[in-house]
Amino acid sequence: MDIEQTEAYLRRIGAERPASPSARALRELHVAHLRSVPFENLSIHLGEEIELVDEALVAKVVEARRGGFCYELNGAFAALLASLGFDVTLLQGRVYGEGGRLGIPFDHLALRVRTQEGGDWLADVGFGAHSQLPLRFGERDVQADPAGTFRLVRTAAGDLDVLHDGTPQYLLEERPRELADFRAGAWYHRTSPESHFTRNLVCSILTEDGRITLSGRRLTTTVDGERHVSELASEAEVLAAYERHFGIVLKGEPVLGRVT
């Protein structure tokens, strides 16, 4: 990313260029990204291709003002952080499902970020409702976060379990990866009938006082822990909700079941 692209990305998330790649700057960028760029899988149900290269990911987030799922969001965020001087490593994870069953390899993409102070952090803006702040990578005790408590636990095999309020979320491997390594995982999640993403429509974003999620035609607004659910009656209402709550302008309503 050149200077102009970096500045455009920062404007997209409403953030100032940090003076240095510090831990404080990482925290501010992390929250700004979560509050500006939605977690969404609409491309799968709009028949759009998902291209895992930096240029395409940044263009989708910045120019098209869209969101994405883990590969797209953390891939784009990694490009932004690197352009700002952070040392960023891509890591692969496997998400825990029902009954504690692990998903496929390269099920999830997360980031290990080193700041100028020398500390490493787990940054993840692509897991939906997760930690709002980066987590200390080397810390094994409980870490408090506005979203709850988190803990990174070393497994017998040497990997890390990432826990949210005591529940395992995903298993993280520490070996550095490249963006291209995640293409098979992205292909699986946008084509397989076993993938959660082909069976559900979701668009969700963090707000200052809660979260807003649109799943198909069900709009859920959470404010200070109180949930309000409403059913949208028409395509026009759905398209208006995407634009109003997520800044996403669509020509037509995404259709569940359409895969590329």
Image (cartoon, rainbow, N blue to C red):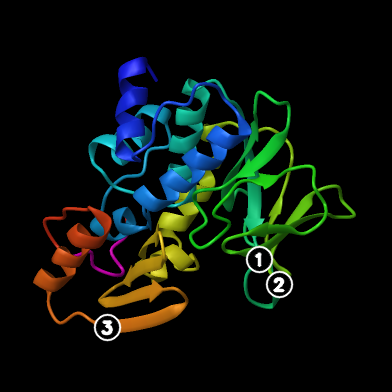
Residue position marked by numbered label 3 in the rendering:
230
- Give the position of the C terminus as an image quadrant: bottom left
Residue position marked by numbered label 2 in the rendering:
100
**Whole-percent x and y of residue 126?**
49, 51
| First along the sequence among labels 3 and 2 | 2
Q: What's the amino acid at mark 3?
A: Ser
Disc 2 vs disc 1: Cβ atoms closer than 8 Å?
Answer: yes
Q: Is residue 117 visible?
A: yes
Q: CA distance from mark 2 to mark 1?
A: 5 Å
**Whole-percent x and y of residue 108?**
57, 51
Q: What's the amino acid at mark 1?
A: Tyr
- Image quarter of residue 166: bottom right
Q: Dot 1: few (<14), some (14–19), or many (≥20) neighbours within 10 Å? A: some
Residue position marked by numbered label 1 in the rendering:
96
SS type, badge 1:
loop
Magenta segment: 253-259
Q: Is residue 219 left or right of residue 107?
A: left
Q: Dot 2: few (<14), some (14–19), or many (≥20) neighbours within 10 Å? A: few
Q: Is residue 181 visible?
A: no
Q: Dot 3: few (<14), some (14–19), or many (≥20) neighbours within 10 Å? A: few
* Furthest-top residue in this view: 2
Marking on residue 118 = none
